[in-house]
Image (cartoon, rainbow, N blue to C red):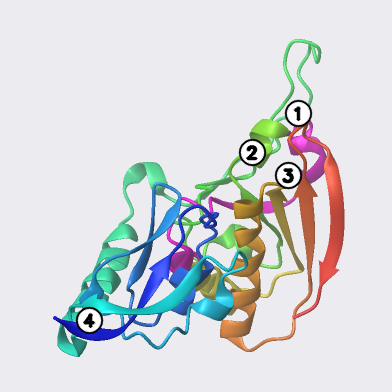
Amino acid sequence: MGLRNILKIDEEKCNGCGQCVTACAEGAIEIVNGKAKLVSEIYCDGLGACIGHCPEDAIIIEQREAAEFDEEATKAHLAREKEGRKQADFVCPGMKAQKLHVKGPAADSAAQVPSQLSQWPVQLKLVPPSAPYFANADLLLVADCVPFAMGDFHNRFLKNNSIAVGCPKLDDVDFYIDKLAAILTANKLNSLSVIHMEVPCCSGLTHIARQAIAKNGIEMSFEDVTIDLQGNVSATQTIES
């Protein structure tokens, strides 16, 4: 071990948005229990590419005793991560892409509100990019807490739309960027809307949409909708790529 530059994360400031994870080309940072963590000193080159991507100023580069950056070990680490993502694409029978028939109003509408879900699966990690329900679709990229907070989510947003659900705080942001980019590559969407909660970490979903569009090198605007903790729309804005 020797004295060198290496990153330091202030967990008190970190909101777990995951933007630093995406910015680190060496895969040295992961989100663990809602906080950014340095996976291993040997994966960190100390250049600080992640610093400018942290909205909370929770990352600095300090000089201290640390294990040397190991380029070969880092390459092996990145290869393992890539292989893990491939395995995550395995399709079991319960994940088979399918269109669902949306039922009409129930005979006793007071007793049952019909679902407006028209596809399966819905999780961004599981949806196939070439699924037929994405072709010429109005796609909703939705934080997974939103449908629980909004009592009228199905009729207000989901009806006649396709959906991909994810959590930018707890899930693999880099994987989500790649998956959404693949969906954009495989399909010509009519529109994209990002719907997330008002809590800071949830805005990472907007970052995922921006990065996926940038990765494709396309010009595409999308609607960004913020939901408050009472289930109301608190803000809506159009974001240009």
Report the amino acid beneath label 3.
Leu
Question: Is label 3 or label 2 in front?
Answer: 3
Q: CA distance from mark 1 to mark 4?
A: 46 Å
Q: CA distance from mark 4 to mark 3?
A: 42 Å
Report the amino acid beneath label 2.
His
Label 1 belongs to which residue? 151
How many residues crowd mark 3 within 10 Å: few (<14), some (14–19), many (20+)?
some
Q: Residue at x 32, y 58 (%)?
A: 88
Q: Secondary structure at mark 3?
A: helix
Quadrant in which residue 153 is drawn:
top right
For marks 3 and 1, the one nearer the N-term is 1
User: In front: 23, or 182?
Assistant: 23
Kindly indicate whether the residue at mark 2 contacts the one at mark 3 (C-beta within 8 angstroms): no
For marks 4 and 3, the one nearer the N-term is 4
Inspect the magenta stretch and tell me whether residue 163 lies in it.
yes
Label 3 belongs to which residue? 158
**Range of residues picked out in magenta:** 150-176
Label 2 belongs to which residue? 101
Q: Which mark is residue 197?
A: none
Kindly indicate whether the residue at mark 2 contacts the one at mark 4 (C-beta within 8 angstroms): no
Label 4 belongs to which residue? 74
Inspect the magenta stretch and tell me whether residue 77 lies in it.
no
In the displayed structure, 32 sits above or below 189; it is above
For marks 3 and 2, the one nearer the N-term is 2
For marks 4 and 2, the one nearer the N-term is 4
